[in-house]
Image (cartoon, grey):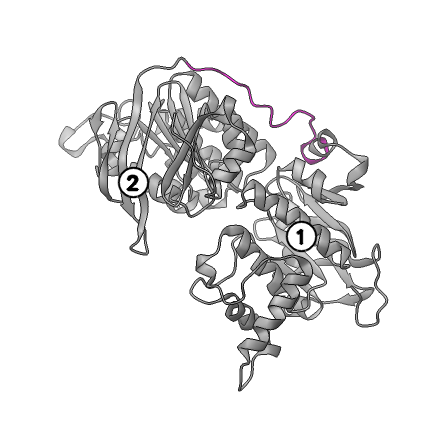
Amino acid sequence: MQNRDGKVKAGDVVVEMRKVTKRFPGGVVANDHVDLEIRAGQVHTILGENGAGKSTLMNILYGLYQPDEGEIRVEGRKVTLRSPKDAIDLGIGMVHQQFMLIPTLSVAENIVLVDRSSRGLLLDLNRVEKQITELSTKLGLRVDPKAKVGQLAAGEKQRVEIIKALYCGARILILDEPTSVLTPPEVRDLAITLERLTKEGLAVVAFITHKLPEVMEMSDRVTVLRRGRLVGTVETKSVNQKDLTKMMVGRETLLQLERLEGKKGNAVLEVKDLSAIGDKGLPALKKVSFSIREGEILGIAGVAGNGQRELEEVLMGLRKAVGGRVFIHGEDMTNSQPEKIIAGGVGYIPEDRTKRGVVPDASIAENLSLKICSEPPFAYNWFLPFRARWFLNEHEIGKYVDGLIQEYDIITPSKNAATRNLSGGNLQRLILARELSRHPALIVAAQPTGGLDIGATEFIRNKLVEAKAEGAAVLLISEDLDEVMSTSDRIAVIYGGEIVGIVAATEAKIETIGAMMAGVERMQAS
């Protein structure tokens, strides 16, 4: 792939970021004099924990942020990127983790929206569809330009986003967490796609948090950031996963899950023929049945949008079931209020941390004590008609909160700071601390490590396993297949709102689970 002058060839530096610095209000330095070189014909991965500065650096390159210091050169020319339009005009495209597509429009219509050259007084959509077909065929990106985006699987939507960027002339392609929503077969397809793109001379930048096997397989070079600073850039073939881990966090052993076994007891959660309607008025859960015993983790594996969110909401009383029953410790809790379900011994780690996990404007101390502040010794038991919440024991609450902050290593300048200022990993530690400190009999954990760094991921997985070993039943709903397979005792695969199979984790094969997630295989529940 050549530039306008026809001079760029594989291995040439196409992007230079020199001493790039970005500061945010409150004294946060997201990027501290970071250097980065991106070369044509290579996949360059940006690694780092949450808060390391990866997203900020790529958002600067895409024109979403402007640096406070430093310079950017594209194909040797110093540039100023005031907006994504400036980046696109220079041949820089970005595929966001949350796809920027309109579900009700076709593939071609979505692409036309961002390509002004295809629009005018007379739009020739047939010509656009033909060009998309030619481009997708050339690069092996199987996409039907007439298909409605809402009908596509996650891997197909990602291909649409890549084609959209290439259609607009991208020669430098940024991929944000490119494998986070893909099944194992789709991950393999992506690896093939990246290889084809680099052979065409594109420079591909992918920033990933903890999927090191994929980094080793797909990338040519790796740049590691830590706390906003550059640790180093290495050739992938010259390092191993342990080397990269140490560069990221400064210690060698990570993601080592301690396999603590819990004594299997009685059934805590029983779900029988559960059905529910989704937000679009269509069936989202179709006669789902499973059970979880004390001392067991049941993992729900599946690609996003196959009923996981609706299952989470029905179990927690946030969405009505239209059929079937939910039993907790033998008591029928179907369509009960969330307060009753929580009082029944259920801990809840929601997928949406900010909207459902915390009160963002409340302090860290207030969020940590939300579920215990109406009971002694955290409140005075005076005037019972008014409940104890009217008379808080600030001293006891303070001791309790300090203990949780220390035990769960929640990094904050003060327990009185607003919760909205916490990073994603610390926010999840707060939610985990609040829920697990109550020693619930059942834990519903939805995407508990989604978007988190290696350290937070390791910590949270081990805490769930510890809770299981202490006798809790854990429902783990996760789109991270590695997480489900390494953490669970049994794995239930959900597809199209149905459980298409349940298998013991010790007997699970990633190929089989992947095929079930894609809807091409089904097995008898066990």
The answer to whether residue 243 is above or below residue 47 is above
Quarter occupied by the N terminus = bottom right
Pick the residue in front: 524 or 326: 524
Pick the residue in front: 449 or 493: 493
User: Is residue 53 visible in this depiction of the protein?
Assistant: no
Label 1 sits on residue? 193
Identify which residue is drawn at 75% across, 61% down: 72
Identify which residue is drawn at 80% across, 41% down: 235
Amino acid type at circle 1 is Thr
The answer to whether residue 306 is above or below residue 18 is above
Other residues around mark 2 within 10 Å, as few (<14) / some (14–19) / many (≥20): many
Q: Position of residue 38 (x, y in %)?
A: 77, 54
Pick the residue in front: 419 or 112: 112
Label 2 sits on residue? 314
Task: Give the magenta range.
Answer: 246-262
Q: Position of residue 391 (x, y in %)?
A: 25, 32
The answer to whether residue 220 is above or below residue 197 is above
Left/right placement of residue 85 relative to residue 338 reads right
By secondary structure, the bulk of the magenta-drawn segment is best described as: loop
- Which of marks 1 and 2 precedes in the sequence? 1
